Amino acid sequence: MVSIENLHKKFGKNQVLKGVDLSINEGGIFAVLGPNGSGKTTLIKSVLGMVIPDKGTIEVQGNNINKSSEYRHKIDYLPQIANFPSNLKVKELIKMIKDLRKPTNEEIHLIELFKLEPFLDKKLGNLSGGTKQKVNIVLTFMFDSPLIILDEPTSGLDPISLIRLKDLIQAEKAKGKTILITSHIMSFVEEVSDEIVFLLEGKIYFKGTIQDLKTKTKQPDFDHAIASILTNNHA
Amino acid sequence: MLKILKYSFYDLMRSRWSYVYFAFYLLLGVVLLFLNNDLSKAVITLMNVIIVLVPLIGTIFGVMYYYNSKEFTELLLAQPLKRPSIFLGQYLGVALSLSMSLILGLGIPFVFYGLFKSGAIWDFSLLLITGVFLTLIFTALAFNIALSNENKIKGFGYAILLWLLLAIIYDGVFLMTLILFEDYPLDKLSLVGTMLNPIDLSRTLILLKLDISALLGYTGAVFKQFFGTNFGLIVSFSVLVVWVMLPVWRIVFKSKKKDF
Amino acid sequence: MNKLITFLTVIFMAKLMYAQNIEVCSTCSVSTLTEAIAQAKDFDTIIVKKGTYKEHNITINKPLIIIGENYPVIDGELKGEIITIISDDVTIDGLFVINVGTSYTEDYAAIRVRKSKNFVIQNVVLENLFFGIYIEKSNYGKIYHNKIIGDAVEEYNSGNGIQLWYSNYIEIEHNFVEHVRDGIYLEFSDHCIIKNNVSEQNLRYGLHFMFSNDDLYQDNTFENNGAGVAVMFSKKIKMINNTFKENWGTASYGMLLKEINDAEIIGNTFQENTIGINIEGSNRIVYKNNNFINNGWAVKVRGACYANSFLENNFLYNSFDISYNSKVNDNVFDRNYWSNYTGYDLDKDGVGDVPYRPVKLFSYIVNRTPETIILLRSLFIDIIDFSEKVSPVFTPDNLLDNNPLIKKATW
């Protein structure tokens, strides 16, 4: 599905990615983890074409993404902080994104799911953070793309919505889609992901299932496994 | 690009600032015309306003819009859209909505005053065309500044600085240079100096209409050819077009390279 | 009643007997104007029928009335002067005179009046000429309703439309002059009246005065001339209700005043000239009720001008209202309307509460470095003009209009 070779990226003097090689197979949920500044977001943004790598190649479904925008038809992306044009109404935003991508009716179901009907005629500038995030989720999931990238999808969500989101993710997985997630909430990651990719200082430190990680670090649970990687490397 | 342009434009058309800008021009037009009752005088005052305020508003508004819609831009970037079309669309959205406010804000009072029946219509059209050019140029320059500066405060700072530089400081330096080198033939230098600053260029364009009698008082042959014929008008407009193209081209160039 | 008829008949008979009509046409017994003049007696009328007469050096040496019917053409074939009047009481009416010879040693004219009195030249059309109507040491004449169309290209080999030299009490009215060197030129000619003429597109001046005093020119239009109107070394000239328009160029102005004293300049319009009025060494002149519209410089004062007064004029949309090249001012500006005035009138008496300073610092800079004109109306220039206005350093600080009008002056 996605294959990354020897990816380098530098911001100013700060070398964020130092030769990342990663291949993600089709189907399943992959969590990209790592401490702050390890390059998670940069990696995801590189795949999305928002960050231009200094070196290395990225292929999505076998096509090099360099200087192309068409491949993004195959990706649904949930950005970390969603700030929308404040003068637009929710309804209009949804209509607009559909207009920019392709027509779909999936949003009706999603709006219902997240109880967004009362907000449809409100301006985006007047919404709370959590509601905005729900709109964001609707925008992401309403297109039926084979690759879904979620950057901190849980932020600002109430427990009910969180459960719905999890269900949604599982449902998409069941359709055979590839889902890429970054999150700080370890329990969430542990619950949903099939495989994790651990980034450390610009390189892939670990790639495998949670079970593998536990075995490798000889820790009984996921939280401790992650903590042990961090302490070992900083010690 | 047209879709982005459409949405940016709609977005701005609903923004409070567009109305403030529009109301400002409307008020200005009404005050100038109906309190003063002197069309020629109004056109002269408007010229001063246009060559000073339009660039200022263009830069500030451009920078502001860019920073305010940053997250939205990122949302767009993740969509299957080409980068240049996202930024050009936004740029044109801002520039066109500003131009609209200008044209309607000034145009409505003037039309009501009986512009179409008066001889000042050409002067007035020239003013509006120049105003639109200045909006296009300075919004593009603003986008350039914003694209090159992640820091919002810095971006605003540079935008104000750019305006100060081109609207005031440049002319001061220009004047000192001309006075210092007054013993040398200066007409080419002064024309080139004018071309290098879009505000001066627009001003000259309007001078060609309003102050042609004074401009023809100067002896230099190059001046004479420039101001005495349509040559000046054609050259000025061409250079203005170049002034729009250069920053727009840099927006495209920069947007392809930039990380978000 | 009968007496009256008898009386008129006697007059008429007498006229028939003493003043004869001579007809000139190609088939008549008299076929040239020269021949007709030779045959005519004093006070005869010569009627020239329509046709072309190739004649030059026609000398009119007796009092005659020469009338052209349907504009007969007198063609000088570029051989020299065409008509010379050397007698008093000559009238020329309705001729079409063309092709005057050009010479660098003699001023050939289409019609010349020399040392004669009481002449009338009217309804004459002159084309392809060197000098048009040349009045030389002749007094009490009338030049009325003529049309003079030259084709002058260079100043050195072209002549003037109407020229007066040592001639007094001449009336020049309703003439139309274009494309010559000076439209109307007066030298050493006093007490002349120049009225309702149009002088345009001439190489040098529309009207030119030299050493002529006590003249009046009124209701004339001077448009698009090389340098406008020049009034030099003359006294007590009245200039009233004339229009000076579109005189554009480096050394061009609506009007040039040089060494002029005690003149009155009233009710004129100066529109779209590079310089409206250029003043040099002129004293005691009254400028009243003039309109200065859209000029580069409305009034340019070049020094040695004293005791002039500018009263109730309108200064509208000029790039510069007044320009001085010195710090000394002895002229008065009062109750003018200045479109550039930005003051207020709180007591509503129609007069601005703050004095107006018509001389800008920038005009001083432009005098010094002409190229800086390109910065006209720049914000920077406005700022330095403002600071000069607040505390004058380079411009005369007593040069003020203390009573600037709030509305245009009317009269």
Image: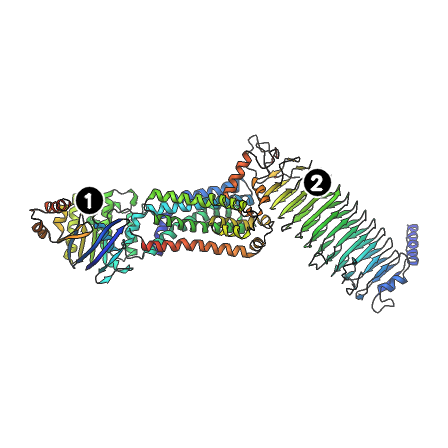
The local secondary structure at tag 1 comes to loop
Mark whose residue sits in front, 2 or 1: 2
- Viewer can see residue A33: yes
Asked where in the image residue C404 lies, by quadrant, the reply is top right
Look at label 1 and name its amino acid. Leu
Residue neighbourhood size for the residue with mark 1, other residues' Cα within 10 Å, grouped as few (<14), some (14–19), many (≥20): some
Residue neighbourhood size for the residue with mark 2, other residues' Cα within 10 Å, grouped as few (<14), some (14–19), many (≥20): many
Residue lying furthest top in this view? C347
The local secondary structure at tag 2 comes to loop
Residue lying furthest bottom in this view? C27
> Which residue is at the front of the view, A202 or C54?
A202
Query: Which residue appears at 70% of the width and 44% of the height?
Result: C257
- Percent x, y for residue A181? 18, 51
Would residue C189 appear left or right of C333 to someone viewing this image? right
Report the number of numbered marks.
2
Q: Are marks 2 and 1 in contact (CB under 8 Å)?
A: no
Q: Which mark is residue C282?
A: 2
**Distance Cα–Cα, label 2 vs label 1:** 89 Å
Would residue A217 appear left or right of A96 to someone viewing this image? left
> Circle 1 is placed at which residue position?
A157
Would residue C177 appear left or right of B35 to someone viewing this image? right
Query: Which residue appears at 43% of the width and 51% of the height?
Result: B137
Would residue C63 appear left or right of A191 to someone viewing this image? right
- Percent x, y for residue A76? 23, 55
> Which residue is at the front of the view, C56 or A105?
C56
